Amino acid sequence: MMRMPWRSGGGLCMVRGCRGFTLLEILLAMVVLALVVSMIAVALSGSMQVIDATEEQGDIYYRARIAMQRISDDLGSAVLADDVDFTGTGQEEGGTRRELLRFASMAHVVFVPEKQLPGMGLIRYRIVPDRDRDGMLVLLRSDRLYRPGGKSGQEVPATDWFLLCDRLRSVRFTYIDRKGQEHTQWDTRKVAGEPDRERRLPAAVTCRLEFWLDRKEETSLSFSTTVLLPAGVIHAEKTAANTR
């Protein structure tokens, strides 16, 4: 027997379809919805963290590439002038200020051709603490045109230092002689008591830059390159030929 619809208050409904949701069913639905939303939020949060980490590492790779290219060009064109010595120290980490490298190079950068002249430059690298990021280091570069008879050891004005790289944890240079032995320092200056000491450039220099990834987690990312110094290699070959 067919059931007839029942009209109440002007509305039409079926007798079996008028029952609503119970409180327990509503609570279960809210719990399920909350679980789904939380799972989506966790997934999105993890994806955003991965994207941020990837972008940050990409930025560090870019900084390292620019800095390494500049250092390679400078060292690859290094020369040993009569009144300009090659002096270099080893590793620097922490919050001290000091000069790491000083040498003459044909890779002098001319920013304004109308006002500046090309030629041999006096290149210096210096490490200083980052004033904006606590515990990080900044690598600065100075490039001044070499003038014969000038004082190569004089202090460089603050305006002549340019930022080469930041967000550094440590910087290390290693100097390799013609025999392949590594040294933490290199100095061509005359030493009292050694009048016969020969002035010569290293055959190669290894540069290692270590960047901070996360200071709280103590994680970092390192890059390294070895640059041959043609002037040093040629001089080493001539010296070896003369001693045979």
Image (tube, grey):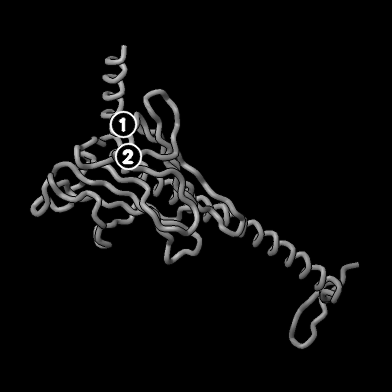
Residue placed at 73% from the left, 67% from the top? 34
In the picture as drawn, the residue positioned furthest to the front comes out as 193
Looking at the image, residue 228 sits to the left or right of residue 90; the answer is left
- Number of numbered labels in the structure image: 2
Q: Earlier in the sequence, mark 1 or mark 2?
A: 2
Q: Amino acid at mark 2?
A: Val
The quarter holding residue 226 reads top left
Q: Residue 93: x and y, percent?
A: 49, 52
The quarter holding residue 174 reads top left
In the picture as drawn, the residue positioned furthest to the left comes out as 114
Residue placed at 36% from the left, 31% from the top? 204
Q: Which residue is mark 1?
A: 197
Q: Amino acid at mark 1?
A: Arg
Above or below, comparing residue 56 to residue 202 in the picture = below
Foreground residue among 104 and 136: 104
Residue placed at 40% from the left, 44% from the top? 89
Callout 1 environment at 10 Å: few (<14), some (14 to 19), or many (20+)? few
In the picture as drawn, the residue positioned furthest to the right comes out as 1
Residue placed at 33% from the left, 37% from the top? 193
Above or below, comparing residue 153 to residue 83 in the picture = below
Foreground residue among 52 and 30: 52
Above or below, comparing residue 83 to residue 39 in the picture = above
Distance Cα–Cα, label 1 vs label 2: 8 Å
Q: Which residue is mark 2?
A: 191
Foreground residue among 132 and 45: 132
Q: Quadrant of the C terminus?
A: top left
